[in-house]
Amino acid sequence: MIKKVPARAVSLLVVFAVFLSLFFTALPPASAAARGAWAPNTAYAVNDTVTYSGGTYTCLQAHTSLTGWEPPNVPALWKSGSTTTPTPTPTTPPATNGVTFYADINYGGNAVTLGVGNYVLSQLNASGIPNDWMSSLKVPNGWTVEVYENDNFGGAKWTYTASSSWVGDSVNDMMTSVKIYTGSTPPSVSKPSEVPSQIWTYVMNADNAFGNGGDYALLLSAVIKKESSFGAGLPGSPSAGDGLMQVEPNTRNAYLSQFSAKFGRAYNHSSEQDQVYLGALILNEKIVRFGNIYNGLLHYNGGDNWYPGATDSYGRPILADQYANAVYATYKGYGGKN
């Protein structure tokens, strides 16, 4: 039978508990552990657990127990219940196989790799990617990246199926959300070997804007080849200011409001992506108005009022038919379906 200690005596015991536990050296202290049933004259360490009268107690202060210091009597030394170390929440390690985004061009600066998934801004931030930050990216074979201008996959969208050492003026520091996936991709076409990767990115982005499944990208590539040799023909050309698709200034100005309505922002002529967007907008309108791709090409080159034998203000023949023949043949050679 356990001898009960008067309440006043218990209070005095509590006061001296810490003092005695520091200087009582009869037995060495033990490591924190489950110690079984409580016993007097035993060294206990912080977080040791004992059982007593059917209950479990956790040691709050290291001490050597004495008769009368049973756990229920000395709350300064013992807390009812066991103390368990919570299991740490597993953290997702950084992806090692995926798309790597870089802060600078040419794969420079800070880099963050993301695996398959849809990432809104808060998720990008949690992964270490600030808003409006990316300038280049590496895309593994068979992967597709959809970069969005706004959060929650809104605004302009740019699609990458290959690495890009420079995403261009219109995409640089514009990424606010992104989708990454593998396997089959929406386009059912492949990049023609002669089309530069950056040009292919531009035309695929334009294709996505008009929802043509990749076929429009082939047609736009054929137009850019004819108009500017994929940009190689621009330096020193009198028409260099008209960009990859050689849209004349008067025509360009006539479509600025339509461009803003379609893409939600003002046209930036210094952006090659916007040059392609604008040309795609105009060509799409011609195709819709005149019934098919070939007729659309005729009027993209010759104007809305073109007809066989038409001449310009200097009396020179407008050879829109030759233009359409060349572009259409290239488009079909790329695998064009219409």
Image (cartoon, helix red, strand yellow):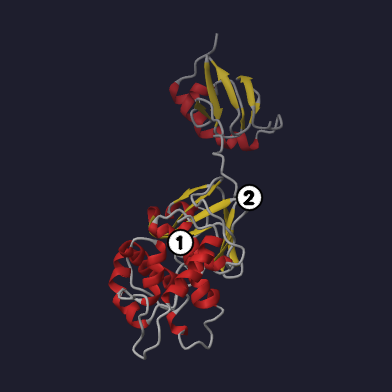
Towards the viewer: 149 or 108: 149
Query: Total marks drawn?
Result: 2
- Residue on which the image places disc 2: 97
Query: Height in image: 132 above or below 212?
Result: below
Image position, residue 280 (x, y; %) = 40, 67
Q: Residues within 10 Å of mark 2 (few under 14, many from 20)?
A: few
Image position, residue 45 (x, y; %) = 63, 32
Q: Residues within 10 Å of mark 1 (few under 14, many from 20)?
A: many
Amino acid bearing label 2: Asn
Towards the viewer: 192 or 290: 290
Image position, residue 1 (x, y; %) = 55, 8
Q: Give the residue displayed 29% in from the left and 66% down from the top.
A: 261
* Contact? badges 2 and 1 (CB < 8 Å): no
**Splitting the image into 4 quarters, where does residue 306 fall?**
bottom left
Mark 2 vs mark 1, CA separation in Å: 25 Å
Amino acid bearing label 1: Asn
Towards the viewer: 162 or 294: 294
Q: Could you tell whether 29 is left or right of 83 in the image? A: right
SS of the residue under disc 1:
helix
In the rendered view of the protein, which quadrant contains the C terminus? Answer: bottom left
Q: Tell me which label, 2 or 1, sits earlier in the chain.
A: 2
- Residue on which the image places disc 1: 205
Q: Give the residue displayed 36% in from the left and 84% down from the top.
A: 311
Q: Which mark is residue 224?
A: none
